[in-house]
Amino acid sequence: MPLTLYVDGPRWRDHLRSVADATPGLVPVAKGNGYGFTVAGLARRADWLGVDTVAVGTYGEIEAVDRRFTGDVMVLEPWRPFLDPPSDRRLVHTIGRLDDLAAIAASSQDRPRVVLEALTSMRRHGLTEADLRTAFDTHPGVLVDGLALHLPLGGGHVEEVDTWLRIAQPARCYLSHVAGTELDALRIAHHDVEFRPRVGTSLWLGDRDALSPRSTVLDVHAIGRGDRVGYRQRRTLRDGHLIVVSGGTAHGIALEAPAAADTARQRAISLAKGSLEATGRALSPFSIGGRQRWFAEPPHMQVSLLFLPSSVEPPSIGDEIPVDVRLTTTTFDRINIS
């Protein structure tokens, strides 16, 4: 019962190539669910692009990349003494504490390769200004590959990046969430620094129209007003059809991160959705007849139950219907690249 990601291969590959050509020093990011493609799948694409470095999110993702990518592998999560990563000259570790810098140097006979991450306005991981100066001045036992800056979304980072560059004075700087005119301005202002943009979403998912998630119709049942359906035996409010489709919580269907409701409109939408869910109604991401349809009840682990009113012609078993999902949180049964 497949939940399938269909990919217009020529169009997607053209997009990947255009991003790579327009982004000198590109470091593709392959982490998590691989933006819907799996980490292993993205490693193969990165190798096809001919880049020299890929960034993974965690040490647990190295294995999926190792056999499929011939270049260096940068790990974005900070190294900690309790981790036991493989000893591999292709690995580049991220260091965010002076104690960890000393510990990784002492843990290996061979000088490990590291990037020193600054504590940017993200306030997530990284070295303070004073610690960063110390780290760049004294780093025996390791090979420092450069400075790493992980910035917030939304732009407006030139001043902050400029400040960190003047503190660390690196030969190379790895940047996350800095692109376009901001990156151009930094290259001009710091022509002696090699910038390495780490790019995930805009690379793999930048041409969303090339990607088409679809769900398979598994069963269709005529139901009448008052019939009970599903695990929770809710009564239906009117006549129609119960449509059973592939895709449930195991795939990431209807599992959402907390919404960043920054505007009045976004807050109003969140309030409206919450009010509907409080009454037992939730709009599904599945579309039939050109409209998203209501869940009959919360999704099951591998399938979902949808209510379709009697005024709409039901699909047939085996048909595929569109499903609007967040690709960074969805696991597909099948990926079909033309």
Image (cartoon, rainbow, N blue to C red):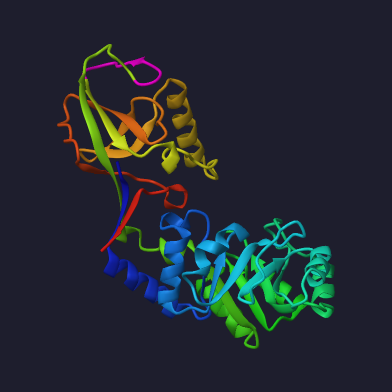
Between residues 38 and 235, which one lies in front from this camera angle? 38
Is residue 229 rendered to the left or right of residue 129?
A: left
Extreme residue toward the top, this view: 226
Q: Quadrant of the C terminus?
A: bottom left
Is residue 55 rendered to the left or right of residue 139?
A: left
Q: What is the chief secondary structure element of the magenta stretch?
A: loop
Identify the residue shown where x is 16% and y is 36%.
316
The reply to whether residue 318 is in sight is yes
The reply to whether residue 58 is in sight is no
Tell me residue 180's x, y (percent).
50, 73
Identify the residue shown where x is 74% and y is 62%.
126
191 falls in the magenta region: no
231 falls in the magenta region: yes
Image: 251 above or below 160: above
Between residues 11 and 192, which one lies in front from this camera angle? 11
Image: 296 above or below 285: above
Tell me residue 250's x, y (percent).
44, 39
Within the image, what quadrant is residue 273 found in?
A: top left
Within the image, what quadrant is residue 169 found in?
A: bottom right
Extreme residue toward the bottom, this view: 192
Range of the magenta residues?
230-239
Q: Quadrant of the N terminus?
A: top left
Is residue 151 rendered to the left or right of residue 116?
A: left
Within the image, what quadrant is residue 304 found in?
A: top left
Image: 80 above or below 137: above
Identify the residue shown where x is 53% and y is 77%.
71
